[in-house]
Amino acid sequence: MNESPYTLKSYLIRLFVFTGGLYLLAFGVSVIIKANLGTATWDVLHIGLSENFGLSIGRWVQIVGVLMVILTSFLEKKRIQVGSVLNIVFVGFFLNQILAADFIPAPTTLSLRVMMLLLGVGIMGIGSGMYVSSKIGAGPRDGMTLYISKRFSLSIGTSRTILETLALTSGWLLGGPVAIGTFVTVPLIGPIMQRSLGVWTKILVKVA
């Protein structure tokens, strides 16, 4: 008989870290949007879709994410993981709630906008590392990246770059906000996420 690798207490702790990480990720996205210096690659697409076809940014996060999970599942002939669906639903929900609450102040000077942009990037990276460390549910881009890597014999880095480029180009064509902030997020989020992942993995090994 197969047994869960986690006890109930361990799973609840990991679920808390998973949910907290997704909230921080959504909060970081919101801060970057408020900075108004361009957004992260995929948010260029989400905002472009929102502006052209209606619905909220968070709703498009959910729609695009679900479509990617379904496509990846079909291509790999594997069942959809519940954790991946929860990932998409939570991020879109949190993002909508944060933007609707409108409690993040809009910066009034360029220096404040730059500081806000960097703060948002940092929060996104930390949140991403948190939710990945929980091992509860991978994001939709993670699965597609791995599929492209295996299908075309490419490195994971190259596969992710291809995916990010497609999202950025599509978002730009839809009128999404491409600016300096878009290109700042690309090299910065990854290393911050990696550091956060290492820290939270060690924490969870000890407590969960």
Image: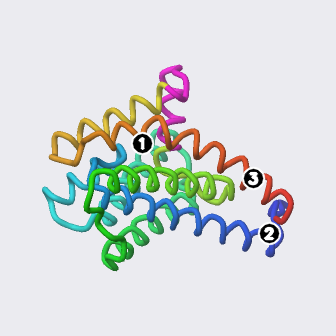
Label 1 crowding class (10 Å Cα cut-off): few <14, some 14-19, many 20+? many
Which residue is painted at 80% across and 69% down in the image?
10
| Residue 116 in which image quadrant | bottom left
Q: Which residues are magenta?
A: 142-157
SS for dot 2: helix
Which residue is painted at 43% across and 37% down in the image?
186
Locate residue 60, reporting x and y percent: 30, 60
| Residue 171 in which image quadrant | top left
Mark 2: amino acid:
Ser
First in sequence: mark 1 or mark 3? Answer: 1
Contact check, label 1 and label 3, Cβ < 8 Å = no
Mark 1: amino acid:
Thr
State the mark number for residue 13.
Answer: none
The front one of 1 and 177 is 177
Which residue is disc 3 drawn over?
201
Q: Using the numbered discs, state the Cα–Cα distance from disc 1 to disc 3 in whole angstroms.
A: 23 Å
Tell me which secondary structure the magenta stretch mostly adopts: helix
The front one of 112 and 95 is 112
Label 2 crowding class (10 Å Cα cut-off): few <14, some 14-19, many 20+? some
Q: Using the numbered discs, state the Cα–Cα distance from disc 3 to disc 2 in whole angstroms.
A: 13 Å
Locate residue 133, reporting x and y percent: 68, 54
Which residue is painted at 46% across and 50% down in the image?
121
Which residue is disc 1 drawn over?
185
SS for dot 1: helix
- In this figure, which colouring scheme has been used for the structure? rainbow
